Amino acid sequence: MEEKKEITASQKKIFILITLLIPLFFFILLELSLRLFEYGGDQRLFIEAPGEYASYMMLNPEVNRRYFLHQKSIPSPRNDIFLKEKPENGYRIFILGGSTAAGFPYSYNLMFSRIIHLFMKRVFPEKRIEVINTATSAINSYTLLDFTDEILDYEPDLILIYAGHNEYYGALGVASAETVARHPFLTRLYLKLKNYKTFLLIRDAVGWVQRIGAKENSQPSATLMERLVAEQTIPYKSALFEAGLRQFRKNMQDIIEKIQDAGVPLVLSELVSNVSGIPPFVSVKNQTFPAADSLFRLAQKLEDMENFTEAKKKYYLAKDMDGLRFRAPEEINVIIHQLAEANNLPLVPMKRYFEDASPHGIPGNNLFLEHLHPNIRGYFLMARAFLETMKTKQLVSKVWRTTLREFPNKVRKQWGYTELDSLYGDLRIRILKGGWPFKPKTAPNKMLTGYKPETEMDKLVYKIWADDTFGIEHGHAFLAGLYEKAKDYEKALREYRALIYLTPFNASAYIHTADMFIKMKRFNEALPLLSESLHLHETTYANKWVGQILLEKQKVKAALPFLKKAAKQNPRDVQTLYNLSGAYALIGAFAKADSCLSILESSKPDFPGAADLRAQLDRVLN
C-alpha cells in the first residue's frame, strides 16, 4: 500500500497564500472587467469636448452622479470649456460653489463667473483668459473637496470660492436625503472608495435592494430643493447645527491646504442672502433662543419706526434662528473670515457690497429673487465684488487698465441678455416658489401641474424649461430669426449678442451678431466680432468681411491675408475676388490683380466696378 506524502511546511504556506489570494484576484479581475465595460459611466470632472471642440476639455454633465444616489434627475454643471494645452499667455480661473455660483435661476450668460470672464477679456486682451465654473446646485463642501485635486491637475492660476449655503441639505450634508453616512470619516471614506468600480457596483446593488418596495416620500412635482431635505428642523446651536459647522470648517481647511500646497492663489467670499424679504420658514419654540417669526416681526416694526440699525440686527438674527437651513447662518461667515485670516487669503466683503446697495443697509427683495439667489442686478454686484478684490490684491496683473466704475450699471446695460433671459429666470423661480417650503409640503406644485402659458413669449420660455432638446440658446436663435426676417436688425442683434454671452466659445454666435452690424452698415462694430470668431474657428465669411472692412479703412496690407484666405476657401465668391484684385492693385502687384479679375470676369463679367478696375489694370499692364 502506497504511503501518503505529508505536506511540507513550505507547501502549506503556499497553499494558504493561494487561498488568500483567490478573493484578491477575483476582485482585481472584477474591477478590471467593470472598467473595461465602463460600469457607472465616465464620472471624471473634466472630459474631452466633442467634434470641432476636440482641442478643448469640458465639464462632465454626469459628474454629479458621484453624489446623488437617489435622484432620477441630477443637477449638471455649466457649459464652460478650456484648452487642453494651456497657452503661454493663458490665465485660467476656476470657480467652486453651489447654485448661486452657478447663476440660478438664469442661464450661463448671467453667472457672475461669465461676467468676470468676458469683462476680463476686455481688460486684458493680451492674455488668453479662461474662467471655468464648476459650481452646481445642491452641492456642498464635500463636493468642493472632491473636485479640488482634479482642478489642480489643469494648471489653475486662480481659484474663487463662493459656498456655504448648502452645508446642511446639499448632497452628503449632515441633514441631506442624499447622504451616505452621518460621520465625516465615513463620508470621506466613501469619496475615496467611489473611485473604484467594484465599490460602485456594491453601492448600486444595495441601493436597488433599498428601493424595492420603498415608498416614494415626495410629491412627483417636488422640486430638488424639497427632495433633498431629510431633517426639516435644525434648531440653532443643536447637535446637527454644530455638525454642519464642523463639516464646513474641516472641508474648507483641507481645500485651502491642497490649493496652497499647489501654490495657486485662492480668494474666498462672504455669503449673502435675503434677510428682510423672506420670513423664516420654520420657527422653533424653545426656552433657550427667541423664535424666528417673533424676531422677524420685531425687525419689521423696528424698520417701520426707522430704527434701521436694530432692525438690521434682528433681521439677521431671525434668519439665523430659522430652523430650515436653506440660508447659511452667520456662523458660516465667521468661519470664512477665520479661515481667510489664518491662511492669509483675500476675502471678498460681499455683505458690504449688498448692504451698501440696499435701502438702509438691509438686503431684501431689491437684490434677491427668493431666499438667497440674487436677481440680475445682484449677480452683477457679485461680479464687481470679486473683480475689485482681485484688482486690490493685484491678481492677474499688478496693473488693471480699468477703474471698474462702469460696474455694474454701464456694463449691465451693454450685456448680452434680453427679455427672454429674465422671463426664463422668472419661470424657474415661480416653479421653485410653487413648491415646499413656500407652499405646504402635501400640496402639488401648481406651476408644474397646472401652468398654461398664455403669450407667445411665455410659450417659448416654457418650451425652453420643459423640452430637454430645446435650450435657451435655441430660444434666442428662434427670436433672432423672427426679427431678422422682419428686418428688425436691432432686435435680432440683441438676441444674437445674448448667444455670444451664453456660448462665448461658439464662432457662429459672433458671426451672426457681426452680420447684423453689417446689415446696418455699422462695420466698425462688426470688425472685432469677426476677428474674435476667427480665433475660435476659421470661416470664409469672417475672412471675407474682415478683409473687406480693413480694405475700406485703407489698411491694404492688413486686409490681404484675410482676402487671400477667403478666396482660397471659396474661389467663386465674386465679391472676394473683386476686393482681392483691388488690394493687389493698390500694393502694385498688378499681375496678381489681373489674374484675380480674370477669374471674376469669367463668372460674372457685369459685376459692379469690374469694368472700371479692368480699364485701370489695362492702362498699367499695357
Image: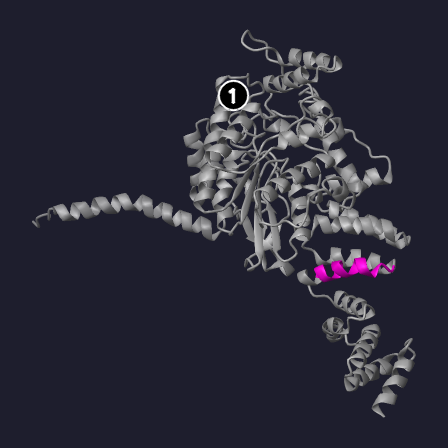
State whether residue 504 is above or below residue 460.
Answer: below
The image position of residue 404, as x and y in percent, is 69, 43
313 to the left or right of 148? right
191 to the left or right of 441? left
Residue 515 within the magenta-colored segment of the rendering: no
Region of the chain picked out in magenta, as a range: 521-533
State whether residue 123 is above or below residue 375.
Answer: below
The image position of residue 36, as x and y in percent, is 46, 53
Residue 529 within the magenta-colored segment of the rendering: yes
State whether residue 501 is above or below residue 546.
Answer: above
The image position of residue 544, as x and y in percent, is 78, 69
Under circle 1, the secondary element is: helix
The image position of residue 622, as x and y in percent, is 85, 93
Magenta region, main secondary structure: helix
Quickly name the residue at label 1.
241
Residue name at image x 56 percent, y 31 percent:
164
Residue name at image x 57 percent, y 58 percent:
89
Residue 230 visible in rendering: no
Q: Amino acid at mark 1?
A: Phe
Q: Quadrant of residue 353?
A: top right
Between 505 and 312, the one nearer to me in the picture: 312
Residue name at image x 60 percent, y 33 percent:
349
Q: Quadrant of residue 216?
A: top right
* Label 1 neighbour load within 10 Å: few <14, some 14-19, many 20+: many
61 to the left or right of 375? left
State whether residue 523 is above or below residue 580.
Answer: above
